[in-house]
Amino acid sequence: MREAVTYGKYLRIEELLGLQQPRDEVEHDEMLFIIIHQVYELWFKEMLHELDYCRRLLEEDDAHRAQHTLKRVLTILKVLVAQLDILETMTPVEFLTFRERLESASGFQSDQFRQLEFVIGRKQRASVERFPEGTRARTALERRWSEPTLWDAFLRFLDREGYDLPEADLHRDVTSPIRPSDGIQRVLVEVYRTSPKSSELCERLVDLDEGLQEWRYRHVKMVERTIGAKPGTGGSAGSRYLRTTLNDPAFPDLWEIRTRL
């Protein structure tokens, strides 16, 4: 007889609750720090799951469900931003009570966040090589490095919808950065003027881009609020580096066309 599935067994609660292990139980706020970042990693996993599905839906020309999936990702992004409010209840002094025990650990080492960047087209080879060969992280990043991005899937969707996209953009090197393209922008202006279905999909991609930029901004302010201009853990440049990532859109063509509509 098969054992009954219970809430605890289905969600593996025992294992889950055993994963929060502060390096020193004396410091009260270390538990919050660990839980927040573990939850972030779970949400990153779900966002990757959804964006992979969205890319597949675009390949199947299912624009309606692709939009719905992007809406779910956008809702998750709002949760990611809201979690920073919880983290900011920890004062700079409270963080300093355990910061040194983080040693070389840093958010820059989150391979899932780097995977998210790769999916939307922000690929850097250094992000792959930061992880040792043969590790789960390196294997996942190598795969995403060579995969088409969400933007590539969207362009191919438009091509199948009958729009005349430049061949160079349709068959670009998917490991290279997404650069503004006058030819793509001309097509996007046509999309906005002729196709409510595809223009709505464009707007969801703009929402995604804006949501990621909002999260980056709030993350920078949280870091500045907590450690000011100090270097980050693991030798990172802290908020000084994070500020360089702001106002750098993932889908520049969708922003450029605003002045052409």
Image (spheres, rainbow, N blue to C red):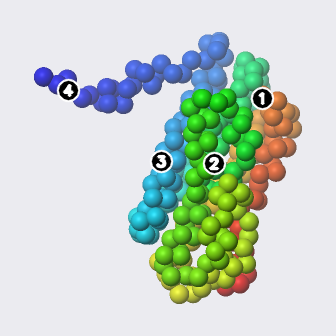
CA distance for labels 1 and 2: 26 Å
Q: Earlier in the sequence, mark 3 or mark 2?
A: 3
Report which residue position mark 4 lands on. Answer: 4
Of 23 and 169, the residue lying toward us? 169
Q: Earlier in the sequence, mark 4 or mark 2?
A: 4
Judging from the image, what secondary structure is the residue with disc 2 in? helix
Q: Is residue 116 visible?
A: no
Q: Position of residue 1 (x, y in %)?
A: 12, 22
* Residue with the most extreme left position: 1
The quadrant of the picture occupied by the C terminus is: bottom right
Q: Which mark is residue 145?
A: 2
Report which residue position mark 3 lands on. Answer: 49
Q: Is residue 86 above or below residue 22?
A: below
Judging from the image, what secondary structure is the residue with disc 1 in? helix
Report which residue position mark 1 lands on. Answer: 233
Left or right placement of residue 200 versus residue 4 in this view:
right
The amino acid type, in three-letter code, at marker 3 is: His
Q: Residue at x 53, y 76 (%)?
A: 159
The amino acid type, in three-letter code, at marker 1 is: Thr
Q: Residues within 10 Å of mark 3 (few under 14, many from 20)?
A: few
The picture quadrant where one finds residue 32 is top right
